[in-house]
Amino acid sequence: MEKHPAPLSSDTARDISIRALTFLTSDPSMLSRFLDISGWTPEIFTAPGSRAAILAASLDYLMSEEDLLLTFAANCDVDPGDVALAHRAIQSGTGPTEKTGR
């Protein structure tokens, strides 16, 4: 019988997504690629009500780029499996939200 990992708390999912976004924005070429793929412009970072979408997109992007995910995990001391759990939490609506920020 396969054991499924416990879901992450919303605080942990938020922390991982913030760390992911910080990682992506720490390098101009990574940020540029993230914005190109998302179709956004830098103004998204100051747009009202965009926080949850940006955090979700940062995890979406990492989950779609395995090499980048593994680099993030190694550089930020985060288990890649926890990134997947944070991604799942956000996708299911138990991650960060605009109203709570968590």
Image (cartoon, rainbow, N blue to C red):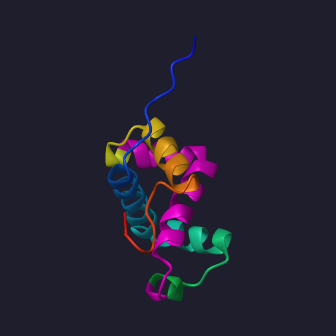
Q: Quadrant of residue 82?
A: top left
The residue that appears at 52% across and 42% down in the rendered structure is: 84
- Check the picture and name the quadrant holding the N terminus: top right
Q: Quadrant of residue 36?
A: bottom right
Q: Residue 66 appears at what percent x and percent y?
A: 59, 44
Q: Is residue 62 above or below residue 55?
A: above
Q: Which residues are magenta?
A: 46-74
Q: Residue 101 appears at what percent x and percent y?
A: 37, 69
Q: Is residue 71 magenta?
A: yes
Q: What predominant SS class does the magenta segment belong to?
A: helix
Q: Is residue 15 above or below residue 57?
A: above
26 relative to 54 in the view: left or right: left
Extreme top residue here? Answer: 1
22 relative to 2 in the view: left or right: left
Which residue is more in the foreground, 99 or 84?
Answer: 99
The residue that appears at 47% across and 36% down in the rendered structure is: 81
